[in-house]
Image (tube, rainbow, N blue to C red):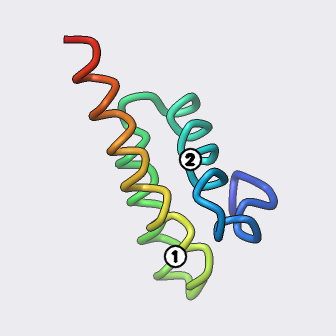
Amino acid sequence: MNPIPGITQGLRDDSVVRRAAMLVIDEFGESAAEYAETRAICLQRQGDDTGASTWRRIAPVIAEMQQKNSAGSN
């Protein structure tokens, strides 16, 4: 199950991916990227290729946002 309702349909737009990444960061903090990667693996194993693909697009955006955030705080 996708915890961000309606997100899969809009993921062709990078702004939607970034918004999803922000929501996951807000919810999971420093472990957000790990959560997204794990979620992609779980969905792939369950046969949900679309859901897995969605999370594979979100995970690197989360990592990038967190990296920029930590670099900006130094």
Secondary element at image label 1:
helix
Q: Residues within 10 Å of mark 1 (few under 14, many from 20)?
A: some
* Residue at the spot 42% in from the left edge and 45% down from the top edge: 62
Check the image and name the residue furthest to the right.
Answer: 6
What distance separates the C-alpha of mark 1 from that of mark 2? 15 Å
* Residue at the spot 44% in from the left edge and 67% down from the top edge: 56
Residue 45 horizontal/vertical position (percent): 47, 82
The residue identified by callout 2 is: 18
For the image, the number of numbered tags is: 2
Q: Which mark is residue 53?
A: 1
Secondary element at image label 2:
helix
* Residue at the spot 80% in from the left edge and 61% down from the top edge: 6
Residue 36 horizontal/vertical position (percent): 45, 54
Q: Which mark is residue 37?
A: none
Disc nearest the viewer among 1 and 2? 2
- Return the residue nearer the eye: 68 or 44: 68
